[in-house]
Amino acid sequence: MAQQFEDSFRRKFNYLRLSVTDVCNFKCTYCLPDGYYPTGSKNSSFLTLPEIERIVTTFAACGTSKVRITGGEPTLRKDFLDIVSTVASVPEIKKVATTTNGYRMAANVHDWKAAGLTNINVSIDSLDPRMFKQITGQNRFHQVMQGIDEAFIAGYEQVKVNVVLLKDLNHHALPDFLNWIKDRSIQLRFIELMQTGEMDSLFDNHHVSGVQIQNSLIANGWSMKPRQLTDGPAKVFTHPDYLGEVGLIMPYERHFCQTCNRLRVSALGKLHLCLFGEEGVELRDLLQSDSQQEALIARIGEHLQGKSVSHYLHDGNTGMTPHLASIGG
């Protein structure tokens, strides 16, 4: 194995979030309220399967053991199964995850499992079908819920459900969500609304701190689990009376970035050191042959030394990310 990717603050990176498309068929109010529009040039194309294989192989050679396939909506790629299979075939990769809006889960989750997908996150921002449609722009609540049921039938021991907290829309629904996971092996992941370049007014109107939920959980007997090596940013809470778990992702906490273990590659082949960082580092010119791996490792390692200690969201910085779908959230 080549030397593990590490930045100047001695943070080691074993988790790659790999976007394979920025296209999405939902119109979530906090991400793409006006629907999908391309963020690259007219001639830009998404990463090919050979390019994806070279990226994953290179990251695996430098300590990565978990890859999350993201978007946009990654399952919109016609070769999604091939992507999963390709990533899963790299020996060093132990976890192959995806984040999906879930609209194709019911029909396809058995095939995803067979291809090597080990973990699923699905976004459900409300358990009320009407509110679900209001937030997502799609009347697919029952279809997505059926997909979760089908995932358990396919053999997944746990499904993670992402919920973006939105003041005056869904943040009062904690009791309903907790009741839903009492007898289900679901990890609810409450995510604070994050301010991006195009969402200033929405953020001002709907941001609510995850600390409120954290305090409520602790007061009602929930306790925090220890972090595992390849865990994402969530603080995970368990309760002896609940089969499900609750994860809190609170990027406005001052020390949120101390445990960062994630790097991102966009669907257009750019390395992003932070979700809220910069314009990205071009990698695609070094993805055209296997013989370029050493140069690719060197370029990533060099730019990692410039990774900031923090995203500074708590200081009001929104970075250069136009919306979360553009580099895979």
Image (tube, rainbow, N blue to C red):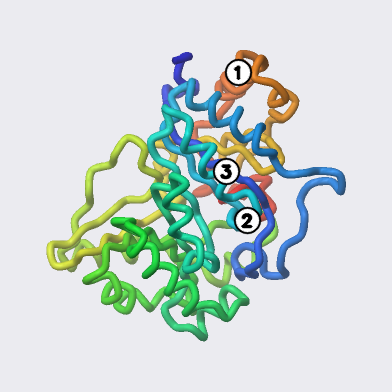
Q: Read off the residue under disc 1.
A: 302
The percent coordinates of residue 149 (x first, y second) are: 37, 70
**What type is the residue that disc 3 sits on?**
Ile
Residue 19 on image: x %, y %: 60, 45
Q: Are marks 3 and 1 in contact (CB under 8 Å)?
A: no
Q: Residue at x 45, y 36 (%)?
A: 15
Q: Nearer the viewer, mark 2 or mark 3?
A: 3
Q: Secondary structure at mark 2?
A: loop
Observer-nearest of 173 and 24: 24
Q: Earlier in the sequence, mark 1 or mark 2?
A: 2
Q: Residues within 10 Å of mark 3 (few under 14, many from 20)?
A: many
Report the front residue among 308 and 170: 170
Q: Which residue is mark 3?
A: 83
Question: Which mark is first along the chain, 3 or 2?
Answer: 2
What residue is shown at x 36% (from left), y 37% (from top)? 230
Q: Which mark is residue 72?
A: 2
Q: Which amino acid, mark 2? A: Gly
Can you say which quadrant of the picture contains the N terminus? top left
Rendered position, 53 above or below 255: above
Write down the quadrant of residue 48 in the picture: top right
Q: Is residue 77 above or below residue 164?
A: above
Nearest the camera: 135 or 142? 142
- For marks 2 and 3, give the CA distance: 15 Å
Q: Could you tell me the amino acid type at mark 1?
A: Glu
Relative horizontal placement of residue 265, taking residue 146 as reference (left or right): right
